[in-house]
Amino acid sequence: MRILTEEDVWAAVRGGSVFACGGGGWVDHGLQIGHAAVNIGQPKLVSVDELPDDAIIITATAIGAPAGTEWQMLGTDYIKAVKLLQENYEGKVVGVMTPQNGMSSTINGWLPAALLDLVVVDATGDIRAHPTGKMGSMGLAALQDYETIQVVVGGKRETGSYLELVVKGSPSKTSNILRTAADQAGGFIASARHPLPASYIKKHAAIGGISIAIELGKAIIAAQPKGADHVIDTIVGKTKGTILGKGIVVKRNVHYSGAFDIGTIEVEVPGDTLTLHVMNEYMAVDGKDGKRLTTYPDVITTLSAETGLPVSVGHVEVGAELVVLSINKQYVPLSSSVKDPTVYPEVEKALGIELAAYALDSIPV
């Protein structure tokens, strides 16, 4: 157990941005929430092994499309979501975790943890960012007989889009309801969900996901004064990543639909054109011959050739020079979610491409 600090905030955002895979929130939002957490309290990061098996852990997150512009999530929304879950759950909640890393999502639970005397658990529902709640639910999506609690809070007060919603039911059905609520709230909304015992987290989560992001972030920050190439080399070296290509964005066709950003981005690199398939995050990359080069749950990230730092889907512009990075799934901890074949059809239908055949290949069940 240790106290999270200002240094950790910066590192979590920098490292989390690599695992954001083009989504995972926003740098400014992550810094804002993180700084608030460490200045208003002393959030504690703990290994799940430090908790008894029956300690209840909940997931704190944000739901929606990072490129949306009509949303509003205040720090109080994250706190209210956790409070509402506590009020509607019969047991005692001990800790919070995040369903994914990201530009802000690595820090999702820090503020409610600091204010509500909870611990931040060093585990993630998925090491990288993903588009649907099912993909961060640690295998719950396939359990139709399991009743969960999910809460969302957020929206602009001045436009009447502010919502508070508590739902109980199967993880798959309640996740769909929350996605609709995010859309109605302007595209993004704060959430708390899935009270689970530490014994389940130990077995099904991506253990150490927060520390991995923080350690990578510290290395990136140390490399920044030496320039973009050094930053990129550091990211590749620390993650055992592979550069798929460096080139110019020639086409961007991404549109907002139902709290998702969906479409493709094309990057022209020497001898090839890379097509990046987007559903909030980068889910796959194909070469110009249609050959699949990388697929979720591989980490797929675009880095700025100018700074070496990750560029989110919402900030990718035609004419920009990007480096496309892939980190093979064998080099990151995998949760039960990515091994669950039921989480793929929804995303495959939205993108019109195959994912499961590639994603599940060589993953031990």
Image: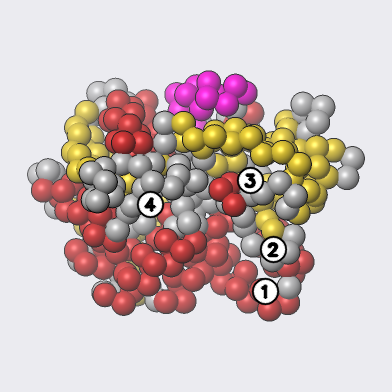
Along the horizontal axis of the image, is 144 left or right of 330? left
Q: Are marks 3 and 2 in contact (CB under 8 Å)?
A: no
The label on residue 300 is: 3
Quick one: 55 or 317, which is closer to the camera? 317
Q: Is residue 335 magenta?
A: no
Q: Amino acid at mark 2?
A: Gly
Q: CA distance from mark 3 to mark 1?
A: 21 Å
First-in-chain label (1 vs 4)? 4
Q: Amino acid at mark 3?
A: Ile
Region of the chain picked out in magenta, as a range: 338-353
Question: Dot 2 corresponds to which residue?
Answer: 308
- Residue 285 is situated, as x and y percent measured from the top left of the image, at 69, 36
Query: Given this view, does label 3 or label 2 mark the residue nearer the observer?
Result: 2
First-in-chain label (2 vs 1)? 1
Image-quadrant location for residue 95: bottom left
- Whether residue 323 can be seen here: no
Question: Dot 1 corresponds to which residue?
Answer: 223
Q: CA distance from mark 4 to mark 3?
A: 19 Å
Q: Are marks 4 and 2 in contact (CB under 8 Å)?
A: no
First-in-chain label (3 vs 2)? 3
Image point (39%, 76%), residue name: 5
Q: Amino acid at mark 1?
A: Ala
Along the horizontal axis of the image, is 86 left or right of 111? left
